[in-house]
Amino acid sequence: MKPYHINKKQILIMGCLGMFPLFSSAQDILSTSDTSRWDYSNSRVEREPGRDALDITFSVSPLAGLGSQEVAYLFPVYVSADGRDSVRLEPVCVAGKKRYKVIKRRKALGNLKPGNPGAGEVRSAKVVESSGLTVKRSVPFERWMADGRLVVREVSYGCAECGTNESEDIAFQAGIPLFGEKDYAYSFIEPEKVMIKCYKDSFDCKVTFPVAQHDLRKTFVDNRQELAGLGQFVSENLLIKGAELKDVYIKGYASPEGDFNYNKSLAQRRTQTLSNYISSRYPALKKAPVYRTEGVGEDWEGLKAAVSGSTLSNKDKILFIIEHNSNDTERESAIRELDNDKTYHILLEEFYPALRRTTFSLSFDVRPYTSEELPGVFETKPECLSLYEMYQLAGLYASRGENPLPVYKKAYEQFPGDIVAVLNYANALLKYGKDADGALQVLEVVREDSRVLFPMAIAYDMKGDWRKAEKLLEEAAARGCNRAKAFKAVRVNE
């Protein structure tokens, strides 16, 4: 124990006034004495469940008799493990038989000055020996208190008021269980296994046809590039491992200018032209159980989407016209009247060309993949994996020491409405990414599901908001979470 450069009487006075100096370091706290004459074994430090407070009970009884002329001062202080924080309890003063009578007489006569031994509240050694003494204090709970300890400084004085003994002892080591990193548990849920998956893909082909014509000219405008893209789309999909083509749907659209019936007929002819072109190069397309072509005609829905995402100053007026007019003629006429054809010409030149398109949609049935196939499919066509297969792949990555977070992220993106995908991704963000904010952002969306509460508690604890974490644990326990219940039970039993 560090030496004190202060005389004994000064120490006594400061103790009586409740000003005994706090311990400044863990070294001071750990300096204990084997000469203590007091028993503190019934002292307790408890955190009451459901109440954010720490109850400190300092219980003392003598192990050896106190001399008739002695005065003993006990200074209990609850101190953090590192010695930086503390809570001071009421000092205890006990006097021997003769000394107690002298102190009482001097107090009655009014000649016991403040700062003299016994100036404060004094207990009789006889009473303390028979029934012990208890001092209690309740304070708001802080996280440092969990590993704190109740330390007692003992100072005793003889009849000459000089210090005869001074020691320090640890009355109680708290060890209050707190939710922390040691309690983090990440629950990855195994999704339901599916035997057949449905995979769909589509491609917008913007082949340009001469005005009012439907014959295909490969070198016209950008047609060569568009046809190359269409061929790549079809060939790549037909080569998907384990996929069986089930449906081919080719739809042709026209921009909404001119006569509606004529545009629909023209769209149908152009659709058939592209159907013949692509099926002649990829005969497998015609073998699909379902092969359909359709000339949809004017693409007002496509125009609505394009205008909604545009920066046109009058786009709300355009959208209103499209929504509140029942046929194409009325719509086109109303748009022309907006500002003397100015808006119409902007749409004609900048928006309509993209609407003259043909959409090729392919649907496949995909068989389950083996564990050996999963990594390759994930790299080339992850859309063909089921949520269950992604879960398997993530486990495979983890077993190899590789980070499975990218797999869980892709599963979340591919199955955004699936609560299992959400929970697994959030747990992966916490476990492998240490990304508390990212996990909370994902989990808040599905806050009504009780399974999100435990990972949310982990996230808030990671962020240092342990009070919020504990509230979530209490809510989780109340809503049936066994992990939260088990943790709460430990707290109560301790």
Image: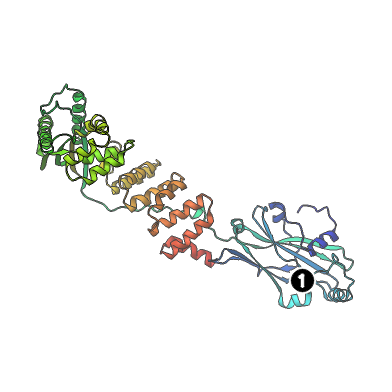
- Residue 293 in percent (x, y) is at 11, 39
Q: Is 262 rendered above or below residue 178?
A: above
Dividing the picture into quarters, in which one does residue 354 lie? top left
Dividing the picture into quarters, in which one does residue 16 lie? bottom right
Q: Is residue 367 left or right of residue 468?
A: left
Number of residues whose C-alpha sits closer than 10 Å to that of mark 1, classed few (under 14), some (14–19) or many (20 or more): few
Which residue was labeled with disc 1? 64
Q: Is residue 66 left or right of residue 428?
A: right
- Residue 363 in percent (x, y) is at 18, 42
Q: Amino acid at mark 1?
A: Ala
- Residue 265 in percent (x, y) is at 9, 36
Q: Is residue 437 left or right of residue 387?
A: right
Q: Quadrant of the C terminus?
A: bottom right
Q: Is 470 rendered above or below residue 375?
A: below
Q: Nearer the viewer, residue 269 or 276?
A: 269
Q: Nearer the viewer, residue 272 or 57?
A: 272
Specify how the rendered protein is coloured: rainbow
**Res 238 visible:** no
At x 47%, y 55%, the residue is 457
Q: Secondary structure at mark 1?
A: loop
Q: Is 385 rendered above or below residue 227?
A: below
Q: Is 367 rendered above or below residue 13?
A: above
Dividing the picture into quarters, in which one does residue 331 lie? top left
